[in-house]
Image: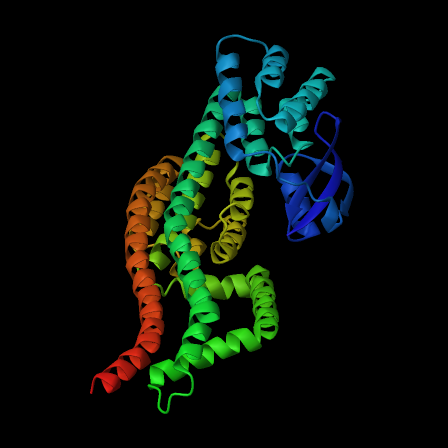
Amino acid sequence: MATFHYIARNTAGQRIEGQLEFESEAAVLRALEEQGLFPTQLRQAPASSRPALRGIRSRDVGLVYSQLADLLRAGVRLLRSLDILADTTVNKRLAEIVRKVRADVADGASLTDAMRAHPEAFPPLHTAMVHAGERAGFLEDVLTSLGTFIDRQDELRNKVVGSLIYPALLVVIGTAVLVGGLLFFVPNLRQMLGSAAELPWPTLVVFAMSDALRDYALLLGLGLVAAVALGYRFATSDQGRRRIERWQGYLPVAGMAVRMVAVTRFCRILGTMLANGVPLIQALAITRDATGSRLLAEAVDEAIEAVRDGQNLSEKLNRDGIFPQQIMAMIVVAEESNQLEKVLLEIADTVERRTNRQVDQAVRLIEPLILCAIAGAIGFMALGLLLPVFTIASSLGG
């Protein structure tokens, strides 16, 4: 993904400036055209100038949307509502951005255009929905939907991350115990044994591991750093992400859970945008970059071209079998009955509940596997340490 800085004019002739993230200049031009903007200048921004998301949490933005919807629904004018939000928002950086948005609106810009100038807080997904709400006259409903949507996404993300904390803690503690034993306990035992004539093979293996860790610590550390760097480079490349996603699909329980998280995100984002008046092609273009799945993004690319050619969304959407058959059947029926946005949101709710159960099952499966692996490694090291002691003790007793 690349960041493009654009200067454009809308249908009223107003000058609009902002940034968009897409894979190519042609994709940016299509997105601007779908938004009713006519670019006068377009250039790719250097990587270092991309907006940073640090310091602004999605939950803070969602709270701003919910509060703004409540204020507008209560009859408070937009400028006054923005003043109140700027004074009450806890996140200082977000409060400063709200003040800038308020200043732009006071100068005659629409709320959408003012938000588009700050993509670090308001991504294209949000601004497209706000634009549809402003144009159709239901801005309060759109803001409420955005606040609810962000809360649901944040809840699902916290669910997945929270479920992985305990397994990660087990791996860290188990690795620390193994490394500490090989560095400190094994050399002491080796000195106690002296030059024993014969040692059991588990003890020889443990001694060899201890020697390798002590004598080649620097080389092993450099190798580990190089492996992590190569792994990160592979994981962040397009080909690597695609292969990792394919490999994840073969994992029992966990593979399906990861895939369903992307499907849930796709259905909820697309359904929410369609329900709030965003055109299908524009909604698909924005949803493609928000799913977090490379395979699903490629399927959405094909679906966009199919929709442009007058075909149905479902004809190209199920690439590589990403969507289960029952979900695709529901999407087909929804297209035929012209209730796509409603069905997509219902699918997202159903799949999210099912995904939560699958995440719990995956965690319950991963935890005993990690425990068994760590217990086996520590047990093998303990066996290697205790066997010569028992051998010497039995020989002295005999």
Q: Relative to 364, does residue 62 appear above or below in the rendering?
A: above
Residue drawn 48% across the image and 56% down it: 299
Residue 230 can be seen, yes or no = yes
Give the total of numbered labels. 0
Where does the image place residue 154, in percent across and percent down from the top left?
A: 45, 37
Residue extending furthest bottom?
Answer: 197
Residue extending furthest top?
Answer: 75
**What is the image's colouring?**
rainbow
Residue drawn 50% across the image and 79% down it: 211
Where does the image place residue 242, in percent across and percent down from the top left?
A: 51, 63
340 sits left or right of 296 in the view: left
Placement of the C terminus among the 4 image quadrants: bottom left
280 sits left or right of 25 in the view: left
- Which is more toward the observer, 327 or 247? 247
Q: Residue 193's quadrant in the figure?
A: bottom left
Q: Residue 103's quadrant in the figure?
A: top right
Residue 278 can be seen, yes or no = no
Residue extending furthest right?
Answer: 41
- Which is more toward the observer, 249 or 341? 249
Q: Relative to 303, does residue 85 appear above or below in the rendering?
A: above
Residue drawn 60% across the image and 33% down it: 122
Where does the image place residue 264, in percent across and percent down from the top left?
A: 39, 45
Residue extending furthest left?
Answer: 398
Where does the image place residue 160, in percent across and percent down from the top left?
A: 40, 46
Residue drawn 60% across the image and 66% down it: 225
Q: Residue 316's quadrant in the figure?
A: bottom left
Q: Relative to 328, does residue 77 appear above or below in the rendering?
A: above
337 sits left or right of 237 in the view: left
